[in-house]
Amino acid sequence: MTTESALTAQAAGEGGDAVLAAGGRVVGRHPDDRRQAVQARRHAWTVASAPGSVRAVRERTERSLVLFGVPVDSSLGGAVLLVVSELVANAVRHARDSPDAEITLTMNDHLLMVGVRDRDPRPPALALAPASASAGPACGRGLRTVADLAREYGGDIRIERAADGRGKTVVVRFILPTGTP
């Protein structure tokens, strides 16, 4: 299964049935109950690996969140914007062999996923301890913050290697709070 199809299948819900419908639409069942199948909302785009890309991705993510019904000034909206900014900044800074990065936002009735794919197969560094003033270089601290934000929403972070061996996708999942559209 390719990284893209894995992301798409996961968007339908881990415990539920996942089916790709014609045209690439995702249909799935909520894992906690027997509600009718829902269609996931998905936005994906590619940006050049350049410093200005972080701002552009953040602005596009804001528009996507509004279309998904997630207020950008909510705590969830702020967390997603910070996560996207950090992941794209990491791709720009560390994925030397990657001329671009692909950003994917997927939301269904219980889950919002952020994916950032680059062509560098090296896994990112994750700081094992919280940041401190006396610690060395900041390498991995941003991903620690990303993991902490995902955990605040019952989610997680994972690294998925591309099926062709050329790159990886950093995937961050947020469980949506009750009442999120």
Image (cartoon, helix red, strand yellow):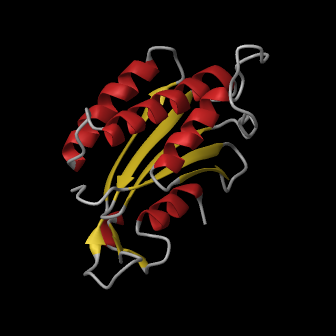
The spot of residue 27 in percent (x, y) is 33, 73
The spot of residue 132 in percent (x, y) is 70, 20
The spot of residue 46 in percent (x, y) is 44, 35
Write the residue at 27% across / 81% down. 35
Image-quadrant location for residue 19: bottom left
Total labels drawn: 0
Q: Quick one: which residue is furthest to the front in this view? A: 133
Drawn side of residue 145 relative to residue 73, left or right = right
Write the residue at 27% across / 41% down. 65
The spot of residue 112 in percent (x, y) is 39, 53
The one of 146 and 108 positioned closer to us in this rendering: 146
Please tell me whether residue 103 is drawn above or below residue 69 in the rendered image.
Answer: above
Please tell me whether residue 10 is drawn above or below residue 181 in the rendered image.
Answer: below
Write the residue at 39% across / 28% down. 57
Drawn side of residue 5 relative to residue 98, left or right = left
Please tell me whether residue 119 is drawn above or below residue 169 in the rendered image.
Answer: above
The one of 44 and 145 positioned closer to us in this rendering: 145
